[in-house]
Amino acid sequence: MAVGKKVLEQYFQSGKSLLVGGVGGGREALALCKLGYKVEAFECNPNLVDFANELMQQEGFMPNIKLAPRDRCPNSNNEYDGIIVGWGAYMLIQGRNKRIAFLQSIHQQVKINAPLLVSFFDYSRVQIYHKIIAKIANLIKLFLGGELIEPGDTLVPDYVHYFTKDEIEREFKEAGFELIMYSNDEYGHAVGLAK
């Protein structure tokens, strides 16, 4: 949490409204509430939504985690001061176009210059490995059919996409965010500002 807290202090003003996506069991949302943020959140797993809302209520906070379709941001008709995509949730969205559509739907619900934080696995140091894996897998896909994979797509044991800085920057830009911070210290994370 040291990296996360540092990023929060630098880019997110306390007491402001945040939308947290891919909130899982609610630990991130709860921690943000305890830091003074006004949090609304969403998750695609109904069991985790129930658990997260119970956790929030037990800790004395409004149980406001909503169920959302997988890889989608629900439209809340609110305008948030910032967005946090829960730990690793962004890298679970399969396909560049789906990730960009997800970010675009988030962009519609934030104020100009609102920060967006995403976390992910970075593969900058092992790019050749991921490029070789993608080429081999896509040769097999030519015979079996189906959507081609991208360098960075892996099964560990489920689908996960690893990123480079250039990839994050391009996806942010296409969705209307300007990349202002990228780090792969401890784990990959990036902050963009809504434009």
Image (spheres, grey):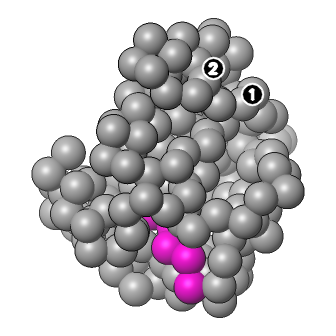
The answer to whether marks 1 and 2 mark residues whose Cβ atoms lie closer than 8 Å is: yes
Magenta region includes residue 33: no
Residue 162's spot in the image, x, y percent?
A: 43, 55
Please identify the quarter of the rendering in which residue 141 is found. Answer: top right
Mostly what secondary structure, the magenta segment? strand
Residue that badge 1 annotates: 67
Residue 148's spot in the image, x, y percent?
A: 72, 53
Where does the magenta region start and end? 113-117
Local SS, label 2: helix
User: Label 1: few (<14), some or many (≥20) within 10 Å?
Assistant: some
Please identify the quarter of the rendering in which residue 108 is found. Answer: bottom right
Q: Between residues 89 and 158, which one lies in front from this camera angle?
A: 89
> Counting residues from the N terminus, which is met first, the one under dot 1 or under dot 2?
2
The residue sitting at 44% across, 11% down in the picture is 58
From this view, report whether residue 52 is shown above or below residue 192.
above
Q: Between residues 92 and 25, which one lies in front from this camera angle?
A: 25
The residue sitting at 43% across, 59% down in the picture is 15
Local SS, label 1: strand
The residue sitting at 22% across, 55% down in the picture is 5
Q: Between residues 103 and 124, which one lies in front from this camera angle?
A: 103
Residue 49 — which label? 2
The residue sitting at 66% across, 77% down in the picture is 111
Magenta region includes residue 115: yes
Q: Is residue 125 left or right of residue 78?
A: left
Residue 50's spot in the image, x, y percent?
A: 63, 12
Q: Between residues 81 and 48, which one lies in front from this camera angle?
A: 81
